[in-house]
Image: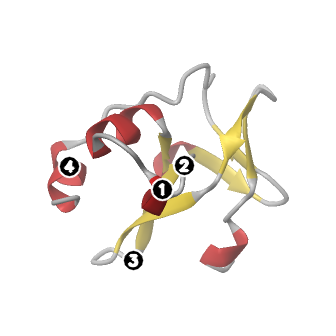
């Protein structure tokens, strides 16, 4: 699947709860892998990048499947997932 196909896809939890919409991706270029789905466009992001990673993103390791929609594991009442120190350093 092309990365461009993931943009604007709806995201649902495995339980069927709507989580948001893919507005941007964070890639690990060394690994050639997606690391996070952002619920806000990166270029329009306001405020602290750490806060956005914590409150407005989903780790790609939580993705169970990508088809017509993105399905993520676990109940996603909040998209809050702590950013790792490596992710924060990569933003600098």
Neighbours of disc 2 within 10 Å: few (<14), some (14-19), many (20+): some
Q: Nearer the viewer, mark 1 or mark 4?
A: 1
Circles 1 and 2 in contact, beta carbons < 8 Å: yes
The answer to which of marks 1 and 3 sits earlier in the sequence is: 3
| Residue under the image location 33 percent in, 34 percent down | 51
Tag 4 secondary structure: helix
User: What is the distance, in whole Å, between disc 4 and disc 3 at their CAs?
Assistant: 18 Å
**Helix, strand or loop for disc 3:** loop
Disc on res. 40: 2
Q: Which residue is mark 1?
A: 44
Mark 3 is surrounded, within 10 Å at the Cα level, by few (under 14), some (14 to 19) or many (20 or more) other residues, namely few
Which residue in the protein does label 3 denote?
32
- Image quadrant where residue 49 sits: top left
Residue lying at 52% horizontally and 30% vertically, measured from the top left: 79
Local crowd at mark 1 within 10 Å, few (<14), some, or many (≥20)?
Answer: few
Residue 33: percent from the left, percent from the top? Answer: 43, 70
The residue most toward the right is: 68
In the structure shown, which secondary structural element does the residue marked by tag 1 occupy?
helix
Is residue 83 at all visible to an observer of this figure?
no
Q: Earlier in the sequence, mark 2 or mark 4?
A: 2
Per the image, label 2 sits on a secondary structure element best described as loop
On residue 88, the disc is 4
In this view, the mark in front (1 or 2)? 1
89 and 75: which one is in front? 89
Residue at 57%, 46% in the rendered image: 39
- Horizontal relation, residue 24 to residue 30: left or right: right
- Marks 2, 4: nearer the viewer: 2
């Amino acid at each position: 699947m092309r990365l461009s196909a993931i943009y604007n896809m709806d995201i649902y939890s495995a339980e069927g709860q709507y989580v948001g919409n893919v507005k941007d991706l964070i890639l690990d270029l060394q690994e050639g892998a997606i690391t996070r789905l952002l619920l806000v466009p990166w270029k329009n992001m306001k405020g602290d990048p750490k806060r956005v990673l914590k409150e407005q993103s989903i780790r790609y390791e939580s993705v169970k499947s990508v088809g017509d929609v993105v399905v993520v594991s676990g109940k996603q009442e909040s998209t809050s997932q702590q950013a790792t120190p490596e992710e924060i350093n990569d933003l600098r």
